[in-house]
């Protein structure tokens, strides 16, 4: 089953236009995305951590918690699920391999491995260590799960395009199926990344940092996967905050808006569970 799921998920990346991969954070959000017609969904490490009242990227969510979360989303929707698994939940390349093996066992279609460390004093791992960890993930995957090699240079205050391309190229050379560097500074940087690593598919988190583009514009730039990360979650939390402000002001009517209970029931009735 793993190899079939791998082929199915990779086909979404390599087809014309690629795919938009929205990130769910609970059962209902996953069902809503499935009902809207998305062909695959992803977890968000930020959103998952927030739902548990914990910070992201500090090893405060466990491998087991994220695996159960991802399996729930897949079981409810029947869709391929890509796991946003931070640095692979472990100090060593062998730990990363263990995480990948577990993700295969839990039925995930894809898994992301970052070069982050969880250490705020040294947030990005050294080049050789980062490459070794992606290599270990690929070796464990055995083409049963799509491996995304990710560098967080840009979002960790390291605006080094050359090093970013060097890392992504190395990730591709050791077998990563998809490459990802959240928030390149602008479209020129994104174009440089896509060109340098071609033909390996590139994921973009919403857009370059300087301008939110349309799906069509990103596709024209050669992007093969567009993910939303935590943005759907924070959009929903923004609506909650506005409702909370209305409630504090005594406006019950404004605080009691949203989708109907009938709609909630309809979505739950579509569960594959």
Image: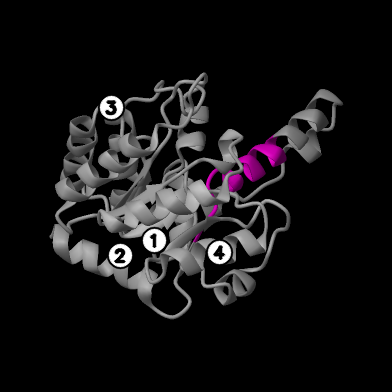
Query: In this figure, which residue is indicated by the disc labeled 3?
Result: 90
Q: State the CA–CA distance, disc 1 to disc 3.
A: 26 Å
Mark 2 residue crowding within 10 angstroms, few (<14) / some (14–19) / many (20+): many
Q: Is residue 156 left or right of residue 61?
A: right
Residue 131 spot, x, y in % from top left:
31, 43
- Circles 2, 3 touching at the beta carbon (< 8 Å): no
Point out the tag, 2 or 3, that comes first from the N-terminus.
Answer: 2
Label of residue 40 in the image: 1
Q: State the CA–CA distance, disc 3 to disc 4.
A: 31 Å
Mark 3 residue crowding within 10 angstroms, few (<14) / some (14–19) / many (20+): some
Secondary-structure class at tag 3? loop
**Front tag of 1 and 3:** 3
Point out the tag, 3 or 4, that comes first from the N-terminus.
Answer: 3
- Residue for point 46% across, 28% down: 57
Q: Is residue 102 left or right of residue 88?
A: left
Q: State the CA–CA distance, disc 4 to disc 1.
A: 27 Å
Query: In this figure, which residue is indicated by the disc labeled 4?
Result: 192
Point out the tag, 4 or 2, that comes first from the N-terminus.
Answer: 2
């Amino acid at each position: 089953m793993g190899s079939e799921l791998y082929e199915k998920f990779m086909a979404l990346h390599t087809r014309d236009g690629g795919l938009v991969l929205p990130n769910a954070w609970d059962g209902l959000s996953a069902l809503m995305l499935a009902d809207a017609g998305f062909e695959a969904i992803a977890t968000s490490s930020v959103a998952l951590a927030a739902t548990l009242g914990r910070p992201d990227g500090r090893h405060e969510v466990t491998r087991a918690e994220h695996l159960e979360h991802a399996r729930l989303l897949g079981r409810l929707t029947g869709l391929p699920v890509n796991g946003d698994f931070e640095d692979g939940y472990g100090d060593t390349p062998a730990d990363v391999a263990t995480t990948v093996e577990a993700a295969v066992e839990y039925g995930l279609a894809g898994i992301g491995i970052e070069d982050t460390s969880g250490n705020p004093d040294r947030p990005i791992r050294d080049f050789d260590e980062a490459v070794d960890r992606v290599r270990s993930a690929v070796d464990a995957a055995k083409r049963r799960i799509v491996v995304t090699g990710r560098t967080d240079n840009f979002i960790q205050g390291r605006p080094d395009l050359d090093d970013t391309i060097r890392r992504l190229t190395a990730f591709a050379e050791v077998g990563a199926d998809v490459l990802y560097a959240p928030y390149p500074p602008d479209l020129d940087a994104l174009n440089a990344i896509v060109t340098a690593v071609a033909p390996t598919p590139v994921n973009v988190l919403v857009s370059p940092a300087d301008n939110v583009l349309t799906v069509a514009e990103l596709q024209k730039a050669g992007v093969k996967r567009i993910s939303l990360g935590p943005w759907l979650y924070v959009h929903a939390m923004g609506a909650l905050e506005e409702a909370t402000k209305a409630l504090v002001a005594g406006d019950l009517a404004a605080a009691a808006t949203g989708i109907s209970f009938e709609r909630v029931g309809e979505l739950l009735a579509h569960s594959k569970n």
